[in-house]
Amino acid sequence: RTDILYLLEKHQVLIVTGETGSGKSTQIPQYLMEAGWAQKGQMIGITQPRRVAAISLAKRVAEEKGCLAGQEVGYCVRFDDCFDKQDTKIKFMTEGILVNEIMANPLLPSYSVIMLDEAHERSLLTDMCLGLMKKILRKRPDLRLLVSSATLEAEALQNFFQDEVENKSISAEILSIQGRVYPVEVYYLNDPVANYVKASVETVMKIHESQRMGHVLVFLTGQDEVEEATNLLKNTKNTPGVPSMYVLPLYGSLPQSEQMKVFEPFSPKVRKVVVATNIAEASVTINGIVYVVDSGFVKLNFFNPKTSTDALVVVPASQSSAEQRAGRAGRVSSGKVYRLYREEDFKCLPVHTVPEIQRSNLATFILQLKSLGVDNIAHFSFPAAPPSNIVINALELDYALGALDSSGNLTELGMKMVTFPVSTMQAKMLLASGEFGCSQEALTIVAMLQIESIFLQPSHRRAEARKAKYKFSVLEGDLLTLSNVYNAFIQVGMRFYFSHSHS
């Protein structure tokens, strides 16, 4: 605590590294508040890569401070804010909310400290926030930035901030925090498995029937796999004499009320099994996890500039992701990690996940930077520079949509488009829909595109899934197929049974 406060007084940027469980996300904001960093109407802002992390951490810290979420400690995420402009001192938020606040007021006068948590995830918004904060810090010497990372990218971040611009550099220091981590045993397979979803279910059942009590966390790649494994586990008959097991899914598009169930306390006689995507890799702390089952895979978005298309691709996880997953065990007692791959395969994994900025469509990202006065994208300070062909593709698309003029400047249409929390093509679709008399249809389709998919395709029911989707499919494409599903849902009075009757 003393080191953090001392270094933050002396340096504009403090990079904090530490193992999972060291209290970076929950304790540091409280240290800063108690040291007087949230006075004169200013707040301490903490960003999280995901909504569920921002909300759960805010509630946890509020509980520790003896107040309700929304009072001294609050949060702000897309479609949901719970804070008081007068009373809130610690504010958790998603990275997108911080970007929106920078767009509204570039110097962030409401904040004395910004903490970018889980920076090692290197999402597109993480890199954007790092680049923007670097610019803001040069204009606001009184502002402090705390960058929290669980993996060893600290020196690269320090060099990024200390890089001289106009003969000025930002003072950045590194601090390593030791966590209260119990020993964790790691087990590998002798041979690869053909179906890691099935293997994960079998591993959970072996743990449940042979290991001491303790909750289980399973890592799979997406909603389909999570739902499939959850259903398989729920339908597995419990062995006589073995305690009961309660299975819960956790993924990004799951309703917030369902996500929060994984944090609820359970009877010590019941084993909780959480089947999750990489949403549970960082920030999110599920108490009582003793066993982790790691499939070794992750679903990432990749943009192809040649075809201008995005694709969600299942790829091997990185070594840093595997270590993050392992860190979920060993928080409350000694733990065990079951990796569903061989040890030699682990050694061949990439050390870090490819930063999102190097594999994403940057059209929306570039419009946001343009709206913030970044005229020359090539001169913007990126922690990891995006490939030139992706940048060129984004500029060409923004020009084709009318968001940029021939000089690369933001047009009046582009200024409107950047206010929409959707992709540039979707924003143009919404703005143009009135002219073609199809605003309701456009709104419906764009809203449905904001989730991963409305169609589930469990591996054991792929033929049935294709048949169910075919009922709504039209030659005009997937967008009108989505509209057909929505219209059919409306026709039956938005009844709960609709999805079951088409499965």
Image (cartoon, helix red, strand yellow):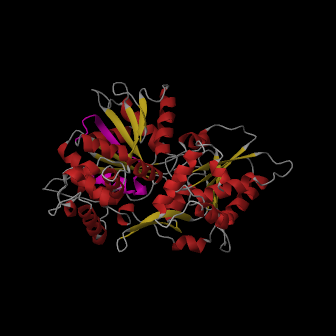
Identify the image quadrant of the N terminus: top left
* Residue at the front extreme of this rendering: 437
- The stretch drawn in magenta includes residue 455: no
Q: Please report the residue visible at 60 percent of the width from the left and 45 percent of the height from the top.
A: 492
Identify the image quadrant of the C terminus: bottom right
Q: Please report the residue visible at 55 percent of the width from the left and 44 percent of the height from the top.
A: 255
Up-down relation of residue 412 to residue 112 (above or below): below
> Can residue 277 be seen at all in this image of the molecule?
yes
Q: Nearer the viewer, residue 319 or 266?
A: 266
Up-down relation of residue 422 to residue 89 (above or below): below
Image spot of residue 231 (x, y percent): 70, 54
- The stretch drawn in magenta includes residue 129: yes
Q: Please report the residue visible at 40 percent of the width from the left and 68 percent of the height from the top.
A: 309
Q: Nearer the viewer, residue 364 or 21?
A: 364
Q: Nearer the viewer, residue 250 or 60?
A: 250
Q: Report the label total.
A: 0
Apparent side of residue 473 relative to residue 208 in the rendered image (left or right): left
Image spot of residue 444 (x, y percent): 45, 49
Image spot of residue 199 (x, y percent): 69, 65
> Can residue 334 be seen at all in this image of the molecule?
no
Residue numbers of the magenta segment: 107-131
Image spot of residue 437 (x, y percent): 35, 50
* Residue at the right extreme of this rendering: 240
